[in-house]
Image (cartoon, rainbow, N blue to C red):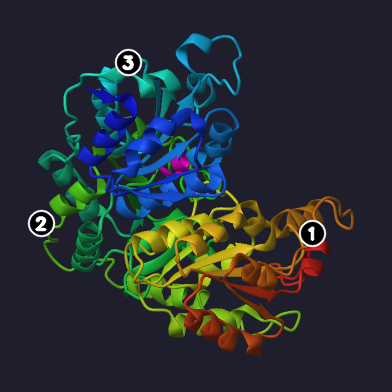
Amino acid sequence: MKTGGQLIVDALEANGTDRIFCVPGESYLAVLDALHDSKIRTIVCRQEGGAAMMADCQGRLTGKPGICFVTRGPGATNASAGIHIAMQDSIPVILFIGQVASHAKEREAFQEVDYKRFFGDIAKWVVEIDDAARIPEFVTRAFAVATSGRPGPVVISLPEDMLTSLVEAPAALPHTPVETRPGEAELDALETLLAKARRPFVILGGTRWDEEAVARMRTIAEAWSLPVGCSFRRQMLFDHLHPNYAGDVGIGINPKLATAIKQADVVLLIGGRMGEMPSSDYTLLKSPYPDQALVHVHADAGELGRVYRPTLAINASPAAFVEAFAKRKPSGSPVWADEAPKHHAAYLDWSTPPESGPGPVQMGPIMNYLEKVLPDDAILTNGAGNYATWVHRFHRFRRFATQGAPTSGSMGYGTPAAVAAKALHPDRTVIAFAGDGCFLMNGQEFATAVQYDLPIIVIVVNNGIYGTIRMHQERDYPGRVVATDLKNPDFAALARAYGGHGETVEKTADFAPAFERARASGKPAIVEIKLDPEAITPTRTMTQIRDKS
């Protein structure tokens, strides 16, 4: 006989869970009690949104469900930000929520929420467990749902009395991973399309990749002389210094790359959905009927034909597809063999930072410095804002599992994601980029980094405004500024108040020594860069945007 709380922990252990992220609540005390005697590491966070984002980053970097526990009502609604990210980004996450006791349901009890209704549109599956004896069944099924087809978040509601009841239940067994593989006929059809092509292009995206699959994709690109781009915030899927890499396909795309994709005669889209952001509002690939012959490879049949009608649909995970197609070789030298080097040269030019700009701090030289000193396996995380352009455009990702950034464009992601990444890889350098507005949305998770001695470095690009919104405001309503100014704390002093290391950068030359002191401190650190608000993009000032010049 075991309590429901014990059965939850048993089921997590059976499915390979090694850590959870949580904000504690009295609604699931029975689970916390069971975790006391478990080998599962419990990381307590400061806000449920941050905890859910940590679980997302864990799932993003490993392909296995990140686990989060929160309490009912406000705890669950706070966590919804992370669940929305996981849903739009196809990340496996399981969120457990303490729920009111069964006798109090449907009475608008204290902090009562109908989670099936609340999470119904932003989660892959939502379930409430009423019978503790079914916990092994439901938890194992949650792992299967979160990881199969198009991965996504699962939400499990746990009535308080169910967690404390004693029941006899079968031991939980691990879930069985589900793989979808391409057929030989589909691979033959792809070869036929490539044989007729003159300007093919490959776009990598989505999830269900691993290090081996990324290596096989590199082999395919070399064998077939294919130019390869990575979808928005999926840049870790291809080595940026490989001669076949053409650039990132997303916001602020290189105009030469956009032209190349539009003029391609065959586009091979592997793993991604090619939604609004990577498709440049459905202009690179027109929806529903692309101008190019589209070969769409996706693990979820429901995504094939959902936005685009593909010429060839291949229902397979990226890993299974590249494993199969890597065995195929072109019959001779492809006619497009000289295209990839041209695209790569254009990428190298596009990704070289400018040396000058308005104000005493220049982000271009800072990015050049980071490119020289960061190891290839450094993990970079960020949320949303114009500051992120400096990472996406100018950092050259070299290895798989080095990027944690929400394709959904959520602010506040970088700091909690960095905490999760450092907990997962304590021996690797982890850098979080954040704007001043972005950092203060989940900056309290810096305290979590201090509590667990996780020496992340947070680079706060502080321009005193909500930069992206101000940019759009000045473009569409020039001179009519409202609701976009910010008065910020001293971020370096804030880091020290938390027990970390703090630095302030007010001119370009300050950055390198400040960064090295932060790294040498061995503590979680914040390096605040005071950036002139005129430096709103790498190539245009706020004044130019206002004047539409």
> For residue 463, which quarter of the picture?
bottom right
Mark seen at residue 421: none
User: Residue 486 — which label?
Assistant: 1
Give the image location of residue 273, x and y in percent. 40, 42
Residue under the point 44% across and 22% down? 160
Quarter of the figure that contains the N terminus: top left
Identify the magenta region: 85-91
Count neighbours of disc 3 (C-alpha within 10 A) and say few if under 14, some if 14 to 19, many if 20 or more: some
Name the quarter where the C terminus is drawn. bottom right
Give the number of the mark in front: 1 or 2.
Answer: 1
Mark pair 3, 2: CA separation: 49 Å
Q: Which residue does the numbered mark 3 point to in the structure image?
A: 131
Above or below 479: residue 182: above
The residue to which callout 2 is attached is 327
| Residue 396 placement, left or right of 254 | left
The x and y percentages for residue 236 are 37, 62
Evaluate whether residue 260 shows in this view: no
Q: Quick one: label 2, few (<14), some, or many (20+) residues within 10 Å?
A: few
